[in-house]
């Protein structure tokens, strides 16, 4: 009977956990799609890389979503079991708490192991690939030939070019160019233009022929008009992000081999997330316990507060560790200790308070 109840509880928890994961991933997917499309529109990404960038971005979020989904899933599932008096009936029949809680702790261990693989191995690789792919997409978008009838941003959005027609030899006709230089906005109109790239690929040049240029500050009545037969506009390329300098893309083995505080802080962060899964699974069990007549979702808000406290402590600890305010041997282990004390308080304080009330109650 105990094994049957254990499997039943585990099925309820796994179902709630998967539903929580699905909802959180859908929300994050919406934000990731919006961010990728915004960058793609600004930097003229090729269409083929957008879906891959979205996938790589979501892979980096799994290690953050899984702990919260596990906590919410356990609190949600056990909240229903307590609300429907199924837990009370099982315990009244002599079923040991370890029989019901053991499978849940086992699920926490499995999820923690999966998060460890993602955090230590898959996420750094995904970050490296995403940054490399984004850099190549920026280059490809910037170096692609101009299309007639379309506005095109250059230099990270510092200049915008439009050509009504493009001849087979690359000559642009009826060209509009807008460029910002501090508060001054320059607008040029030309009958013809040529678009070239420097040999080192760091500068693009728009050569305008037979046109006018207007310089001024938006909102001001002062502006200057110049007519030209030939006008050259150099547009420097924005620097491509160097993936080697991004610690999220550095392999875990390289972080472990370094004694630099910033790299050790990032290593501690990656180790902390799997431990966070296990700690939240343990905290969720007493947290999900409901009093009589409480709603099944009464502890969801408290679970969210616990997760936010845990995550903020880890984030603050990582910053302090990177800045040398916390010794390396202490790392982020103290955060898990604080949360272990919180779990002990959640488990013991309500029972102690109830015993004190009965002891000092008038006879």
Image (cartoon, rainbow, N blue to C red):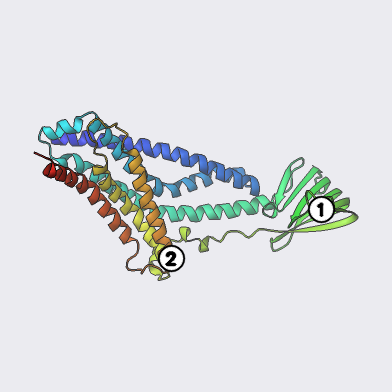
Give residue 99's position: percent from left, percent from top: 16, 40
Residue matched to label 1: 216
Mark 2 vs mark 1: which is more N-terminal?
1
Q: Which mark is residue 23?
A: none
At x 43%, y 62%, the residue is 319
Q: Which mark is residue 322?
A: 2
Give residue 306's position: percent from left, percent from top: 34, 47
Q: Quadrant of the C terminus?
A: top left
Please tell me which residue lies in front, 317 or 273. Answer: 317
Q: Is residue 28 visible?
A: yes
Name the element at disc 2.
helix
Furthest-left residue in view?
363
Residue 248 versus residue 304 in the image, above or below:
below
- The residues tagged by marks 2 and 1 sit, at their Cα atoms, a distance apart of 46 Å
Mark 2 neighbour class, 10 Å CA radius: few under 14, some 14 to 19, many 20 or more: many
Residue 253 versus residue 33 in the image, above or below:
below
Task: From the viewer's perspective, tell me whether residue 321 is left or right of residue 144.
Answer: left
């Amino acid at each position: 009977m105990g094994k049957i109840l254990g499997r039943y509880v585990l099925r309820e928890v796994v179902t709630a956990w998967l539903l929580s994961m699905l909802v959180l991933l859908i929300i994050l997917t919406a934000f990731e799609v919006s961010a990728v499309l915004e960058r793609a529109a600004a930097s003229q990404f090729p269409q083929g890389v957008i879906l891959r960038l979205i996938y790589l971005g979501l892979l980096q979020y799994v290690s953050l979503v899984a702990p919260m989904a596990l906590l919410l899933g356990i609190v949600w599932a056990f909240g229903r079991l307590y609300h429907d008096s199924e837990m009370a009936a099982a315990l009244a029949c002599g079923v040991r708490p370890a029989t019901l809680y053991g499978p849940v702790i086992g699920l926490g261990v499995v999820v923690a192991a999966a998060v460890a693989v993602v955090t230590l191995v898959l996420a750094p690789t995904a970050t490296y690939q995403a940054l490399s792919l984004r850099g190549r997409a920026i280059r490809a978008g910037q170096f692609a030939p101009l299309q007639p009838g379309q506005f095109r941003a250059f230099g990270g959005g510092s200049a915008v070019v439009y050509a009504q027609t493009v001849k087979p030899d690359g000559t642009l006709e009826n060209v509009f160019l807008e460029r910002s230089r501090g508060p001054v906005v320059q607008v040029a109109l030309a009958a013809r233009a040529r678009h070239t790239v420097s040999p080192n690929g760091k500068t693009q040049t728009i050569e305008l022929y037979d046109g006018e240029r207007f310089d001024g500050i938006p909102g001001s009545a002062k502006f200057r008009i110049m007519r030209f037969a030939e006008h050259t506009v150099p547009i420097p390329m924005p620097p491509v992000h160097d993936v080697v300098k991004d610690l999220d893309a550095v392999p875990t083995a390289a972080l472990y081999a370094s004694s630099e505080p910033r790299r050790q802080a990032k290593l501690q962060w990656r180790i902390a997330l799997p431990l966070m899964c296990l700690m939240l699974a343990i905290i969720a069990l007493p947290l999900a316990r409901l009093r009589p007549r409480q709603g099944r979702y009464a502890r969801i808000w408290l679970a969210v507060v616990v997760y936010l406290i845990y995550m903020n402590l880890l984030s603050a600890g990582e910053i302090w560790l990177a800045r040398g305010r916390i010794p390396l041997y202490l790392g982020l282990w103290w955060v898990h200790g604080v949360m272990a004390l919180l779990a002990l308080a959640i488990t013991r304080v309500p029972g102690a308070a109830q015993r004190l009330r009965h002891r000092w109650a008038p006879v």
